[in-house]
Image: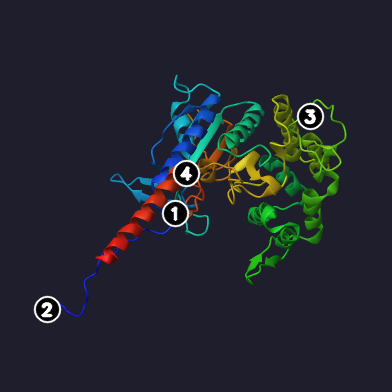
Amino acid sequence: MADKSKKPNKLKARLPRGLADRGPAEIAATRHMVEAIRLQFERYGFEPVETPAFEYTDALGKFLPDQDRPNEGVFSFKDDDEQWLSLRYDLTAPLARYVAERLGTENIVLPYRSYRYGWVFRNEKPGPGRFRQFMQFDADTVGAPTMAADAELCMLAADTMEALGIRRGDYVVKVNDRRLLEGVRERIGVKDDAQWLTVLRAIDKLDRLGPDAVRALLGEGRKDESGDFTKGAGLTSKDIALISDFLFAETHMRGFELSKDSSLVVKGDELENESGWIFSNVNTIFGLSQFVESTQSGERAITDLENIFKYLAASGYGSKRVRFDHSVVRGLEYYTGPVYEAAGAGHRLLHRRLAPAGGSDRARQARRPGGGRPGRRHRVRPRPRRRLSAHGVRFARRRHPRRALSRQSEEHRESAQVCRKTRRTVRRHSRKR
């Protein structure tokens, strides 16, 4: 006999954590944003490609080390022939598979340039700024032999920011090279990869926490305002001093030059200080060379960065739009060469407040763009085996929802006012009756 004391389970309408519904206004803003980005990508000659939302897990590089099950960071399942499939977590891994399958045929000619956009999925704990589903826009060049590809992607990022309604001077594309940091690693002699990853994470927090907090995280650790303690990298005071000099030393940090007649100065598009001196990307890079001299990776990074900024200057992109910043880390275990990301004026990261005053709705929905050269993680290669360089830039639609778009069009606001007045009128007449 059934236990009548047990109440039947009732279905409750609820949204899974880490996901969000979208209404008409947000869909319309996303549509405008997608179109603005698409036009810029195609203006630069990138062709559209679509790949499925599912890929074989091994092609995504998402198996746990020495195990036959996928990483917990992806949504995975086994199909009927016992093969693991996963929802894509970004758009770069599917591109690697796409190129590897077609290289050597008439469908792929190097250098290959394409763009993709679509939803990606992360099986991670939701929180502020972390959602399980969000949209990405990628543009990539595969098989380009020179630094011109990186310079072009920096220009594309700058032009796309302006197409999204962010005015020149309200953003900057910051550029670095991961091999510079590898040169510093060689200097201080850190051999443990886990320890070096902690060092990179500390440097990556410079914009948010400041120099003193970074120094603490490079040492024993740091206690934040809430009392939580974050264990540090455990470097010696000598090593911390070298990294601090690399990050904060005044001799190279400001990189200004008096001459405005240099061939690398883009008149009208160069950052000036209070004295009228011009910020020089190349001078700043040269000042850093003392920290990585005699290291193979560091010297190569210096040469490649100088070439990138020479291409940018020749194309009319000065330090107001694209600037060298050696604190940029990005993709801790992902990129192996040049890296770049966009920040707002005053180094406020764009994913915290992407739309400065006057920005459009479609700009408000985009997250900071960033990119670089994917490296170790994507090992899907064509047959015969062949190593190909890849350069890419990515825009991600915000992963953290807002209760509503902060600015709607006049039509939306007027419509909302009419609806509110109508509801009040109906309630008033109902009371009279």
Q: CA distance from mark 2 to mark 4?
A: 63 Å
Residue at which label 3 appears: 265
Above or below 406: residue 92: above
Q: Position of residue 58 (x, y in %)?
A: 44, 43
The three-letter amino acid code for the residue at tag 1 is: Asn
Q: Residue at x 38, y 38 (%)?
A: 52
Residue count near mark 3 (Cα–Cα under 10 Å), binned few <14, some 14–19, many ≥20: many
Q: Amino acid under label 3?
A: Val
For image coordinates 28% across by 66% down, the residue present is 431
Q: Which mark is residue 410?
A: 4
The mark lying in front, picked from 3 and 1, is: 3
Mark 2, residues whose alpha carbon is within 10 Å: few (<14), some, or many (≥20)?
Answer: few
Taking the spot 85% from the left edge, 37% from the top edge, the residue there is 277
Residue that badge 2 annotates: 1
- From the image, state whether disc 2 or disc 3 is nearer to you: 3
- The residue beneath circle 1 is 123
Please tell me which of labels 2 and 3 falls first in the chain: 2
Of the two numbered discs 1 and 4 in the rendering, the one whose residue sits closer to the viewer: 4
Q: Which structural element holds mark 2?
A: loop
Pointer 3 or 1: first along the chain: 1
Residue 59 visible within the image: no
Give the percent coordinates (x, y) of residue 300.
Answer: 73, 35
Query: Disc 3 and disc 1: Cα gap in Å?
Result: 46 Å
Where does residue 340 sit, x and y in percent of width and height? 64, 40
381 or 52: nearer the eye?
A: 52
Name the quarter where the N terminus is drawn. Answer: bottom left
